[in-house]
Image: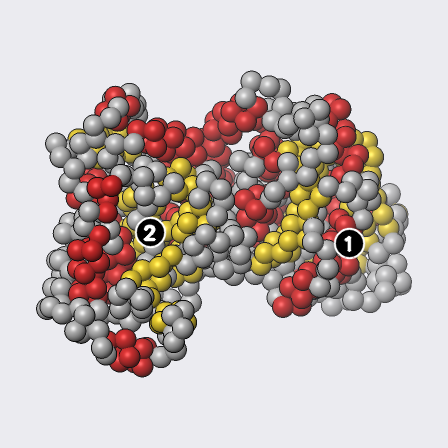
Amino acid sequence: MFNRVDMTLPCLVALADNTPRELFELVVVDNASQDETQAVLGQLAGDVTVITNSANLGFAVACNQGAAAARGEVVVFLNNDVEVAKGWLEPLLGVLDQDPSVGAVGSLLLYPDGRVQHAGVLLAELSSCPLGPIHLHYGGSPDSADVLTRRPYPAVTGALVAVRRAAFEQVGGFDEDYWNGYEDVDLCLALAERGWGVVYEPASVAVHHESQSGPERHVKEDENLRRFVRRWLPRVVPDLLAGPGGGLHPARSSAAAASRWRAGVAEVWKGEPEPVRPGGQAPPAPPRPATPPPAVGRGPSPVAVTDPADLTTHEHAREDAEAVEERRLLDVVRAGRDVCWIEPEDEPDPLVTIRIATFNRGPLVAERAIASALEQTYRNIEVLVVGDACDEATERAVLSVADPRVRFVNLGHRGIYPQDRMAHWRVAGSTPANVALHLARGAWIAPCDDDDELTPDHVEVLLRHAQRHRLEMVWSRASWEAEPGLWVEVGSEPLQEGHISHGSVLYSLGLRFFPYNGAAWKLPEPADWNLWRRMQAAGVRTGFLDQVTYVHYLEAYKRPLSPAPVVRRDEVRLHLGCGTNKLPGWINIDIDPQYQPDLVHDLSLGIPAQDGSVDFIHSEHVFEHLSLEAGIRLMRECRRVLRPGGVVRIAMPDLKYVAERYLDRWRDQAWLRDPGFDWIDTPCRMLNVAMREWGHTYVYDADELRLRLQQSGFTTVRECGRGRSDHPQLQDLETREDSLLVFEAVAT
């Protein structure tokens, strides 16, 4: 930095406010500032290193000094005229963590008025020179799908860029012969020449005041440009070429572009080519993937966790650290008041953003969610639809809605979600939902799932209830379709999991610093419930409206493949959580449609059957994935739907067996011999993995399972051997070797 303490102070405040403390150290290089900069830097506390130069040595030298003093494997270069937003760092680290071939990642930078300052840099043939960098989407809208798409570029700006240390050192850092211009583009091209990727990541957002260093910044602009062109003219081809009318168009052929581009410019740009960029020889970068990595939102933590047993502990620790910041930010946005929204007397009818995240829903999103949004009795709304890289059918359906209140942004790549089916379900859609927080123009947010409906008075009654009772988040009852034609109501006080529907909520946009946690599956809990829980823990003023304002439909792909299969068979057998093991003669139920079950259904909503209509129920490795409370609810559902004399069979791992293996012969287990578990080297690791791997939440022993079945209303409960039963229909059903705890309970 050089002078401009008025810029430096907000930069440092934003950095402290919006960055988890455990993720960074701070190295500040002062290029002999003459204002109050040193006084401000002298007050910094914590993991801070300050380097003070006796003269202004320029951007490149200062950056190299800072990188040399830094201890991390990733070095983030940040101008003092940049103010980072909440959640800016994790996406940058996430890209580097996910793709070892990426050497540098840049952010989406906005002007203070919201226009785009940086969204990637291309090389172009310009009227003034044969090769120069241009900012793509410069001055444009941040709502553009291209702006919101992660992708590789020839270069990104050095105002805010994360660089892998190994790559930075391989190319020799910034070229110190430049003076405050072109160093960043030069660095990116040097990285690319060595095989490293350069990626633009729009999930990382900051405000850039741009070029606030003073007139010294431009004193060597012509010299910088000539150095840049002489160096890279023989070695790269522009992405854009000058057309006959002076405009730019894409270079269609690299060979043709190179030939045309270099012809006729030698006389203007005479001189020997600049020598190859300094930097010691090193092994080439890892091979790059065929396609760029997909976009991410807040997503999983960038800290590498190799032991699955550590996932929950690590995520709890990360959330605990975030919670401190969330409570502090809540105080900031309230500004000494009890709520974070504008008083009704100042803004009686604030704009409300109805937010719809969608993925491959087709016409249904327009026919149901968008239509219900536009039918609101409260008229001051916008409908913001964000696609999770959805298909053309969905895009056409949204764009066909001829209403200026509807805005649509379709992300270029789908968010990163875990492959495990239950974990995926818990956080799918968190990426477009978080993007919407940056795009929303309203003072309030009303989320709506893309296949559901808001009641016509949804916004009106929730907003007035929040204003009247001074609430920052309010939820209501919702009408849920549990099975075709069967509706139940969900929603009550107090705020707890299972008593709030995602779309029955309205909350102030002042709470936009609460993003959906894409890593909530590690806890494990759904991202929407995780969001409401964190808000409540931070002290957000919440309240309940005892009125139905939301309609949740059984999704089309969750409907039975044949009409009412549960109630139209002579002997009804339900297989809960079938996965790939579909039993013939049974109604196979699973939450994930990829397994093509007979019925796709979320069992946390209950069992889609009438009272006393089922003869047999079988589940293998289901209940240990539920919390104790959810497990008991499902056991009671089994009791409800079973006819008198009907039997439920539950098979699962045995906590007692796992504990005994911990004490003796811990390696003597079949699953430890499976590929991918050779890293488990101690009995402690084995035990932790057995408790938490594959999303295990509550693991039972025989006494515990018997007790919980009895508490659920079963009086006849007995333990069975694996594959053994007095009922032929329940014999030899188990397919997992670790299904060592097997019980049957008979309904009376």
Mark 1 residue type: Ala
Q: Which residue is mark 2?
A: 157
Instruction: Name the residue: 60% across, 44% down.
Output: 440
Work out whether residue 542 can be spotted.
no
Left or right: residue 210 compared with residue 448: left
Q: Secondary structure at mark 2?
A: loop
Q: Position of residue 488 (x, y in %)?
A: 83, 44
For the N terminus, which image quadrant? Answer: top left
Q: Nearer the viewer, residue 146 or 720?
A: 146
Q: Would you identify the image quadrant in which residue 712 lies?
A: top right
Looking at the picture, tell me which residue is in the foreground, 666 or 374. 374
The reply to whether residue 429 is visible in this rendering is: yes
Query: Mark 1: few, some, or many residues within 10 Å (few <14, many ≥20)?
Result: some
Residue 494: where, in percent of width, then height? 72, 27
For disc 1, the marked residue is: 371
Seen in the picture, residue 283 relative to 705 is either above or below; the reply is: below
Circles 2 and 1: CB atoms closer than 8 Å: no
Q: Residue at x 67, y 43 (%)?
A: 353
118 left or right, relative to 463: left
Q: Which mark is residue 247?
A: none
Q: Classify mark 1: helix, strand or loop.
A: helix
Amino acid under disc 2: Thr
Of the image marks 2 and 1, the number of the one nearer the N terminus: 2
Disc 2 crowd rating (10 Å Cα; few below 14, some 14-19, many 20+) is many
Q: Is residue 222 above or below residue 307?
A: below
- The tally of labels here is 2
Image quarter (top left, top right, bottom left or bottom right) of the C terminus? top right
